[in-house]
């Protein structure tokens, strides 16, 4: 009887050890699979939007009279009070370098839409070091990402715009 009890105890102990090993293996597998999911999540949040903007700029490069490199960034347009002029402020990147610029043009902010900004000419605003060392080339707004666009009547903000060079 004592032998049977020891045998039953040994079998119960082995079963418990096997159950613990299985739980540890399952936990290890779960940690490995969640670790590989983290980079994909980061990639989808950071890289995919950047690729979307790049693809938009590449599609726009096929338009007649426009060329790259693309300037990608944010644009704000503020109506100059009691005039038909507006101040354009762009903060963005070209070839990995910051290329902010500001200019005043004849433009009415009230009623402007994202679509009405596309095709907008920005004469002489090409930043130095982007297309040429001297800069000063003519630019055209080719893409305004609509979900990041707002117009409150006297100020427009566009969170993502793509601007290309006008080919002479």
Image (cartoon, grey):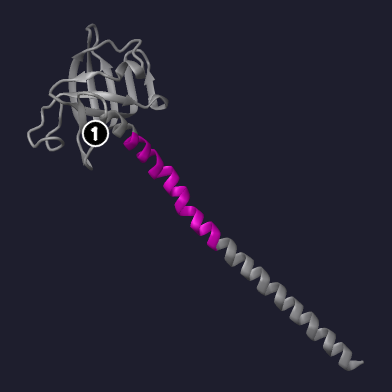
Q: Is residue 8 left or right of residue 102?
A: right
Q: Residue at x 11, y 34 (%)?
A: 128
Q: Residue at x 72, y 73 (%)?
A: 19
Q: Residue 69 is drawn in which quadrant?
A: top left
Q: Residue 140 is drawn in which quadrant?
A: top left
Q: Front-most of 90 and 128?
A: 128
* Residue holding disc 1: 70
Q: Is residue 123 left or right of residue 9?
A: left
Question: At which x and y percent is residue 137?
Answer: 12, 27
Question: At which x and y percent is residue 32?
Answer: 53, 63
**Residue 35 is one of the magenta-drawn residues:** yes
**Residue 44 is one of the magenta-drawn residues:** yes
Identify the element where label 1 is drawn: strand
Q: Front-most of 108 and 48?
A: 48
Q: Label the magenta part by its dominant secondary structure.
A: helix
User: Looking at this rendering, what residue extends furthest in the right direction?
Assistant: 1
Identify the magenta region: 32-55
Q: Residue at x 42, y 26 (%)?
A: 147
> Quadrant where the C terminus lies?
top left
Question: At which x and y percent is residue 22?
Answer: 67, 71
The answer to whether 85 is drawn above or below residue 67 in the figure is above
Q: Residue at x 27, y 18 (%)?
A: 78
> Quadrant where the N terminus lies?
bottom right
Question: At which x and y percent is residue 80?
Answer: 23, 13
Q: Is residue 160 left or right of residue 71?
A: right
Q: Front-most of 110 and 30?
A: 30
Badge 1 crowding class, 10 Å Cα cut-off, few under 14, some 14 to 19, many 20 or more, is many
Q: Residue 13 is drawn in which quadrant?
A: bottom right
């Amino acid at each position: 009887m004592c032998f049977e009890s020891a045998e039953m105890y040994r079998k119960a102990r082995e079963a418990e050890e096997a159950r613990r090993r299985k739980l540890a293996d399952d936990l290890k597998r779960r940690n490995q699979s969640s670790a590989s999911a983290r980079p994909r999540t980061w990639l989808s949040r950071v890289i995919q939007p950047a690729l979307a903007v790049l693809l938009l700029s590449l599609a726009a490069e096929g338009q007649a009279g426009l060329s790259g490199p693309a300037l990608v960034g944010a644009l704000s347009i503020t109506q100059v009070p009691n005039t038909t002029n507006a101040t354009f402020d762009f903060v963005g990147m070209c070839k990995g370098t910051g290329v902010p610029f500001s200019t005043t043009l004849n433009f009415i902010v009230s009623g402007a839409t994202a679509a009405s900004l596309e095709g907008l000419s920005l004469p002489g605003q090409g930043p130095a070091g982007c297309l040429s060392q001297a800069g000063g080339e003519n630019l055209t707004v080719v893409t305004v990402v609509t979900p990041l666009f707002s117009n409150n009547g006297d100020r427009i903000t566009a969170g993502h715009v793509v601007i290309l060079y006008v080919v002479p």
